[in-house]
């Protein structure tokens, strides 16, 4: 239990602490952002859109602040597309990525873009977008109680993660389809290369 977990209003002046072994080397937290090797994850999401991925060197668990040799760690930035809260049911947070195939460290997920002073409660993270392969993952994560649509979350991952593994891909029937997707400005097969 950290001081910011006990007194959430402190998040305006000090960031939630990071467990260094879960994040890439040279990760620093501020009250509203996270930087990895000097790159702001909030700015990266503004430039690239979400979901986006940043990969760096992993931390050695035995040594503090020393990058691991030949090991990678990644950070995935996602956007909240909806928050569903019912009376006595679990809070469900829909995100714009499919994180089923990535080795995410769920308990280290954090909000960026604003300093929340709400107490952290459990939420169920689900993919809210359509994918070629349906996302079935149901991840229970402690997140601030005041999450809203448009907020961004940062999820650390052990190992290398590629954008193709997390980006939603629209359902496609056939590269030679005669439907409305075949009449777009680009051929259907060209979109599948992205």
Image: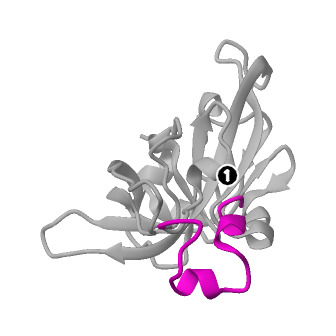
Query: Relative to the observer, which residue lies in front, 100 or 17?
Result: 100
Residue position marked by numbered label 1 in the rendering = 163
Q: Residues within 10 Å of mark 1 (few under 14, many from 20)?
A: some
**Residue at the spot x=75%, y=72% of the render?**
46
The answer to whether residue 19 is left or right of residue 127 is right
Residue 87 rendering spot, x and y as whole percentages: 14, 75
**Residue at the spot x=39%, y=52% of the render?**
142
Report whether residue 110 is seen: yes
* Magenta-colored stretch includes residue 192: yes
Residue 75 rendering spot, x and y as whole percentages: 66, 46
Residue 57 rendering spot, x and y as whole percentages: 78, 30
Quadrant in the picture for the C terminus:
bottom right
Region of the chain picked out in magenta, as a range: 173-194
Residue 54 rendering spot, x and y as whole percentages: 74, 48
Query: Relative to the observer, which residue lies in front, 160 or 107?
Result: 160
Report whether residue 17 is seen: no
**Residue at the spot x=65%, y=37% of the render?**
23
State the image quarter where residue 107 is shown: top left
* Magenta-colored stretch includes residue 153: no
Quadrant in the picture for the N terminus:
top left
Q: How many numbered discs? A: 1
Q: Main secondary structure of the magenta part?
A: loop
163 above or below 108? Answer: below
Secondary structure of residue under mark 1? helix
Q: Residue furthest right?
A: 38
The answer to whether residue 110 is left or right of residue 69 is left
């Amino acid at each position: 239990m950290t001081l910011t977990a006990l007194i959430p209003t402190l998040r305006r002046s000090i960031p939630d602490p990071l467990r260094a072994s879960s994040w890439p080397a040279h990760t620093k937290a501020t009250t509203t952002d996270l930087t990895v090797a000097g790159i702001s994850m909030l700015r990266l999401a503004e430039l690239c859109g979400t979901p986006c991925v940043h990969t760096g060197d992993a931390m050695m668990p035995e040594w503090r602040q020393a990058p691991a040799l030949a090991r990678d760690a990644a950070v995935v930035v996602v956007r909240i597309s909806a928050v569903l809260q019912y009376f006595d049911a679990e809070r469900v947070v829909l995100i714009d990525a499919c994180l089923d195939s990535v080795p995410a460290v769920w308990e280290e997920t954090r909000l960026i873009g604003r300093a929340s002073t709400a107490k952290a409660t459990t939420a169920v993270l689900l993919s809210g977008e359509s994918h070629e392969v349906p996302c079935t993952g149901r991840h229970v994560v402690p997140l601030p109680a005041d999450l809203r649509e448009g907020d961004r979350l940062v999820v650390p991952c052990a190992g290398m993660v590629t954008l193709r593994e997390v980006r939603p891909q629209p359902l496609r029937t056939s590269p030679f389809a005669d439907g409305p997707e075949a009449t777009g400005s680009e051929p259907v097969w060209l979109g599948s290369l992205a």
